[in-house]
Amino acid sequence: MNDDRKIARERLDVWFLSGFFDLPSTFSRPARGWIGAIRYAIGMSGRQLAERLGISVASVSALEKREQEGSTTIKAMKRAAEAMDCTFFYGFRPNGSFEEIVRRRAKEVARRKIDRINQTMRLEGHKLPEEEIERIYSREVHRLVEQTPRFLWNLQSRVNRDTCAEKDPGEKKELRTKQEPPAGRET
């Protein structure tokens, strides 16, 4: 079990779920960008902002354009915010708790792994009962959430290789011993 990662998730969940980032999910940057929108709302001209920043009016226009394109820097946004008597902040807003994020990903990875193993077994003439597949799936999800292995976030092509490399060596044996031999074979 990776306790440090679990503790980190719990701390972030407390912080985010405490309402600090209690913004609607549709919350987004204004069409003219934050700099332009705030400058307009407080009645500050481009020239006045340029003077406060010690740059040219053309540079203010370029800054606002880069913000709209998403290519400005955090440093530039912070300076502009301070020049307009604002505090700049930026961050990520998770789509649910971090525990939920890890659990969703663990379910995806576990489902692919179990489906792959089940397909191999079917090709070999074995068929697992659905309840057995779900039991193994639940156990694998739990393991992945508790251990939070680094491969959990690999792209699909690497997930297959890494999950196979890190799986419990007794797992496939356990699956095979619970099934009857395929028709036509003797035990």
Image: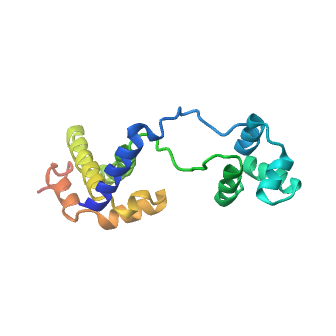
Identify the coloring.
rainbow
Q: Quadrant of residue 176?
A: bottom left
For this rendering, which residue is in front, 46 or 108? 46
Counting from the top left corner in percent of width and height, residue 98 is at 38, 47
Residue 124 visible in the displayed image: no
**Residue at 70% over, 37% down:** 30
Counting from the top left corner in percent of width and height, residue 90 is at 57, 50
Q: Is residue 16 left or right of residue 125?
A: right
Q: Quadrant of the N terminus?
A: bottom left
Q: Quadrant of residue 127?
A: top left
Q: Is residue 1 above or below residue 16?
A: below
Q: Quadrant of residue 51?
A: bottom right
Point out the residue furthest to the bottom here: 165
For this rendering, which residue is in front, 109 or 83? 83
**Residue at 39% over, 39% down:** 17
Q: Quadrant of the C terminus?
A: bottom left
For this rendering, which residue is in front, 51 or 58? 51
**Residue at 21% over, 58% down:** 171
Counting from the top left corner in percent of width and height, residue 18 is at 38, 39
Q: Is residue 147 left or right of residue 24?
A: left
Counting from the top left corner in percent of width and height, residue 164 is at 33, 63
Q: Is residue 116 left or right of residue 183?
A: right
Q: Is residue 49 left or right of residue 100?
A: right
Residue 83 visible in the displayed image: yes
For this rendering, which residue is in front, 113 or 84? 84
Please tell me how many numbered marks the rendered image carries: 0
